[in-house]
Structures are given as C-alpha cells and as structure tokens.
Amino acid sequence: MNTLSYKTVSLNQDAAANAKEWVIIDATDQVVGRLCSKVAKLLRGKYKPCFTPHMDCGDNVIIINAKKVVFTGKKETDKVYTRYTGYPGGQRFNTPAELRKKNDGVERIIRHAVKGMLPKGPLGRSLLNNLKVYEGTEHPHEAQKPKVIDINQYK
C-alpha cells in the first residue's frame, strides 16, 4: 500500500492567509443561536476543504442588519447576561431587551454568542477579531470587495 496517498495536508501560515475571503451576512430575521453557530464555523474555516485545526484559515465575516436578529420563545425577556466589573458587589445583569436599547448592545449579544462557540485560548481570541458586526446596512469594508452569501445554505 502506498503510504503517501493518504497523508493529511496541513496548511502553513502563508497558504492560510491566501485562502481568506471577506463575506457579508444579512442577519434580518435570523435566530441568534443558529446564525452565530454558522458564523463561528465560517470564522474557523470549517466549511473549507483546507481546514487546519490549529490555524486561522477562516473567512472575515461582516454581519449587517444585526438589530433585526430574533430570539425564539421568551428569551428576549427571560435570558440573562451576567458581567462583572471587578469590584465587590459589581455583578451586573442584563436581558437582551435591555441590551438592544444600548448603542453597542446588539453587537455584544452576537459577539457573546459567537465567542462561546469558538475555541478557548489565543486562537479563539484572534478569530473573534475577524468578526465585524453592524446594526444597519452600511459598513466601511467596501475596499475588501466582500461577497454576499446566504447563510441559510450552510448547515
């Protein structure tokens, strides 16, 4: 048997950088968890045939119309996000309905969901920098020539 015929190919940093693309996702009427799981896979590069687990070979993702994402059931009012200021008694609680009223609230909702679906450690933190979230349709990334994709076609 030829042992060279079934070796796993692992990308190097240069090849991974060349495989990166910019994509736009319209989040209108998308469920938060389902949208974010697909975005996390795009950021990671799992939909590509050249996926390498220890490298950043995923795409740069731009989410537009983020304020139009929805939660299923009563999560809009019942789900609670917890954060800690670092001081005694500094635990703060917010619901998605309260966060939507803040300037960057919707971005924080989506980033929190995607962050939980990425690997923990330096790789996950660097992958999260490839995510750009905008509440409206305008974004400053036209120079990168992003392509619009339909997120519903991915599993």
Image (tube, rainbow, N blue to C red):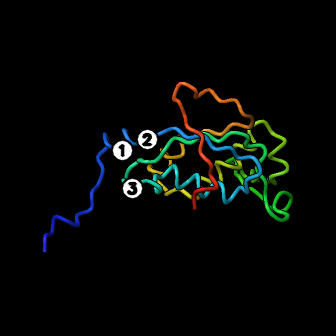
In the rendered image, which quarter contains the C terminus? Answer: bottom right
In the image, what residue type sits under mark 2?
Lys
Circle nearer the N terminus (2, 3):
2
Number of dots carrying numbers: 3
Mark 1 is on which residue type? Ala
Q: Position of residue 21 (x, y in %)?
A: 47, 39
The mark that comes first in sequence, 3 or 1, is 1
Residue 60 percent across, percent down from the top left: 52, 41
Give the image quarter of residue 113.
Answer: bottom right
Pointers 2 and 3 in contact (CB under 8 A)? no
Q: CA distance from mark 2 to mark 1?
A: 7 Å
Q: Position of residue 24 (x, y in %)?
A: 60, 40
The circle drawn on residue 16 is 1
Q: Nearer the viewer, residue 34 or 74?
A: 34
Q: CA distance from mark 3 to mark 1?
A: 12 Å
144 lies above or below 25: above
Disc 3 or disc 1, which is closer to the eye? 3
Q: Nearer the viewer, residue 83 or 41?
A: 41
Q: How far apart are labels 2 and 3 at the CA level?
A: 13 Å
Numbered label attached to residue 1: none
- Residue appearing at x 72%, y 52% in the figure: 88
Q: Which residue is mark 3?
A: 49
According to the picture, the residue beneath numbered tag 2 turns out to be: 20
Residue type indicated by callout 3: Pro
Quarter holding residue 133 = top right
Labelled pair 2, 1 in contact (Cβ < 8 Å): yes
Mark 2 vs mark 3: in front: 3
